[in-house]
């Protein structure tokens, strides 16, 4: 606890709160960020201080290199915003922030300053050499049953409720790092693990009630930092899911907002229209735009107003705090187009200044490349906006994959979508995926067709972009939105489970076959530089056959996808000879089949070949 007394008096200590017994009660409950670092590029720091009547005190700091520039009161008497300058010559250590009341009583908060870590990243921290593995922590594995239900959170564990807390936690993920690493992915992305103190439906993590605290049902901040450290020791990376658009209705500030405009508030509950194109539409009406950017996601997800400069600074600093505290490798920003886009752009610029080459991917749910490119293209848009985003969630490619391998069986959709890559700033930096926590399970959407799922995996892991897989899709997890199974539990993650799908013996023959298929591609991909940095040359699909090449000056891989229902004997490769010049043989990395001629090739129905070419 960082709060101490001066001039001891009768008091009550509760949840880091100090209360004086006098005519006017004054308490000190929170100081956020709770600590900071010297050596930051930006030497300015805003402290949010919360406590009863804290605005009636005067703060003072006497520490070499730390200066109070301004102190601001907002509408609530229980907040102070202190703007500091922390010189780069300041020494590490703990200093006192002394809050003096008008009666002369003092509260003291001990503030910790540490040195910023050296990162020395010359390349983007997460790039196309990586593959992300998305996990919903509550549904992956229960490593610590003692925190299934905790005293400081409302919702208790109930595995019989498909929308309830099931007990998965950070320890459960740590326990299965071997499984994750052996699968062949390189990067973890967790749905939000911060506190969601809601009475129900809190497991998904997007209703944050404390931006500086790990949900106690998942563990604590040190547990998350330990997960990052252990992942780094294995050569793996970790991406944090952050949310600037909204908080949870159970957030500690909801009963006492610093100011009314801390939230986007309406006369009556008003929900967002969820129309992403409103943010980029040159003809958008003001009412449609306001409804999109200021409407609430749900009654339990209040919409944050980043036009409030104090809140904007609070959120940006929180993002920096987690990067520095836990040594993150990247951030996935939820609902990126919804908040004020100028503030979101400022956030990226500040992160890039503080951590050059740090990976940020913006969740941008757009079905058309033209709309998506608003967030990932060079130069000013028609409205003058210049987006600093360099990685977006490639929903257009996702939908084209469903068209290709689903009921439409139209692989031309993939070719057509990739042909529009010219609209992006860097399409090769797009995050590509065939499943996530917001859509139906891949196996279900592909009509429980294992062969089509394999085609989807082969394409996702060899085309341009930074791939992301959703936990369990490698084991044929099924489910769709109506039955609430998008985020189902991983068999073997709970001691009471009848089987353990983390192990070969605990999986069915079909699960093992699919796991081995995906794992083979993933582990080969780790060293396939042509997949990481090579160009993409593709040929228009003919008769359900789509062929493309990933190539550098020295390496070349040919991918053949037969999306048809029939085997094809002696398929001529003459059409592709421009991409085969200089290569006389190759090996399919999936089956280890060797090829000594590229005049023609036999293709099985609904099968992909990933042929590493040799000279």
Image: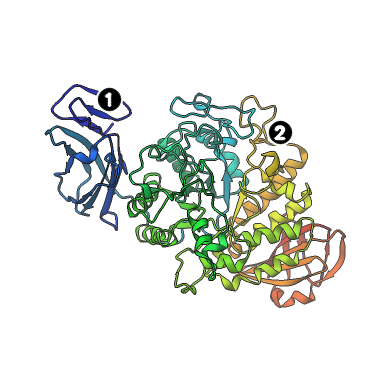
Q: Quadrant of residue 388?
A: bottom left
Q: Residue at x 43, y 34 (%)?
A: 220
Q: In this view, does 200 lie to the left or right of 244?
A: right
Q: Assess disc 1: are there few (<14), some (14-19) or many (≥20) residues with their C-alpha within 10 Å of its C-alpha.
A: few
Please state the horizontal and vertical placement of residue 556, each as a whole percent of the image: 65, 68
Instruction: Locate the N terminus and report the quarter of the image it occupies.
Output: top left
Look at the numbered disc 2 and give the secondary structure of its residue: helix
Please state the horizontal and vertical placement of residue 255, each as a whole percent of the image: 39, 37
Q: Residue at x 17, y 42 (%)?
A: 58
Residue wearing tag 2: 505
Residue wearing tag 1: 13
Whether residue 348 is visible: yes
**Which of 193/517 is in front?**
193
Q: Which residue is drawn at 46% across and 60% down?
A: 124
**Which of 7/535 is in front?**
7
Instruction: Locate the C terminus and report the quarter of the image it occupies.
Output: bottom right
Q: In which quarter of the image is residue 104?
A: top left
């Amino acid at each position: 606890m960082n709060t101490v007394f001066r001039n001891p008096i009768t008091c009550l200590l509760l949840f880091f709160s100090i209360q004086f017994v006098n005519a006017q009660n004054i308490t000190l409950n929170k100081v956020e960020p709770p600590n900071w670092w010297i050596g930051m590029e930006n030497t300015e720091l805003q402290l949010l201080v919360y406590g009863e009547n804290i605005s009636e005190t005067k703060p003072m700091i006497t520490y070499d290199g730390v200066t109070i520039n301004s102190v601001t009161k907002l509408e609530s008497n229980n907040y102070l915003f202190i703007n500091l300058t922390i010189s780069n010559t300041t020494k590490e250590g703990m200093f006192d922030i002394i809050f003096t009341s008008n009666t002369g009583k003092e509260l003291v908060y001990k503030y910790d300053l540490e040195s910023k870590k050296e990162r020395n990243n010359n390349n983007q921290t997460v790039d196309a050499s990586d593959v992300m593995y998305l996990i919903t922590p509550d549904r992956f594995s229960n490593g610590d049953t003692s925190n299934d239900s905790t005293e400081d959170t409302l919702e208790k564990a109930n595995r019989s409720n498909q929308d309830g807390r099931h007990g998965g936690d950070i320890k459960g993920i740590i326990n299965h790092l071997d499984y994750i690493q052996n699968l062949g992915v390189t990067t973890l992305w967790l749905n939000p693990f911060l506190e969601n103190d809601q009475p129900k439906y809190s497991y998904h993590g997007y209703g944050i009630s404390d931006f500086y605290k790990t949900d106690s049902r998942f563990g604590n901040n040190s547990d998350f930092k330990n997960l990052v450290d252990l992942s780094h020791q294995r050569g793996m990376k970790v991406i944090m899911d952050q949310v600037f658009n909204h908080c949870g209705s159970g957030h500690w500030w909801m009963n006492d907002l610093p100011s009314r405009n801390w939230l986007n508030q309406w006369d009556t509950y008003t929900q967002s229209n969820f129309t992403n194109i409103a943010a980029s539409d040159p003809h958008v009406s003001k009412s449609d735009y306001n409804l999109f950017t200021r409407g609430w996601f749900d009654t339990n997800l209040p919409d944050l107003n980043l036009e409030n400069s104090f809140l904007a600074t609070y959120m940006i600093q929180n993002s920096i705090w987690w990067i520095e505290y836990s040594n993150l490798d990247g951030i996935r920003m939820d609902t990126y187009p919804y908040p004020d886009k100028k503030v979101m752009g400022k956030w990226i610029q500040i992160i890039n200044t503080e951590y050059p080459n740090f990976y940020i991917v913006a969740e941008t749910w757009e079905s058309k490349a033209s709309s998506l490119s608003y967030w990932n293209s060079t130069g000013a848009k028609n409205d003058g906006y210049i987006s600093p985003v360099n990685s977006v969630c490639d929903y257009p490619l996702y939908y084209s994959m469903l068209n290709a391998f689903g009921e439409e069986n139209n692989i031309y959709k993939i070719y057509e979508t990739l042909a529009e890559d010219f609209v992006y700033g860097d399409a090769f930096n797009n995050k590509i995926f065939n499943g996530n926590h917001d859509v139906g399970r891949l196996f279900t959407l592909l009509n429980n067709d294992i062969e089509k799922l394999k085609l989807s995996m082969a394409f996702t892991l060899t085309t341009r972009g930074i791939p992301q897989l959703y936990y369990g899709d490698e084991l044929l997890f099924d489910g769709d939105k109506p039955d609430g199974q998008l985020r189902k539990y991983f068999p073997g993650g709970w001691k009471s489970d009848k089987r353990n799908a983390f192990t070969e013996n605990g999986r069915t023959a079909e699960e093992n076959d699919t796991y081995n298929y995906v794992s083979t591609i993933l582990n080969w991909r780790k060293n396939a530089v042509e997949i990481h940095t090579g160009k993409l040359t593709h040929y228009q699909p003919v008769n359900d056959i789509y062929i493309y090449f990933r190539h550098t000056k020295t390496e070349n891989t040919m991918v053949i996808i037969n999306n048809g229902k029939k085997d094809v004997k002696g398929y001529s490769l003459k059409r592709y000879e421009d991409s085969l010049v200089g290569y006389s043989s190759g090996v399919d990395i999936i089956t280890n089949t060797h090829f000594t001629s590229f005049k023609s090739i036999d293709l099985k129905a609904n099968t992909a070949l990933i042929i590493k070419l040799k000279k």
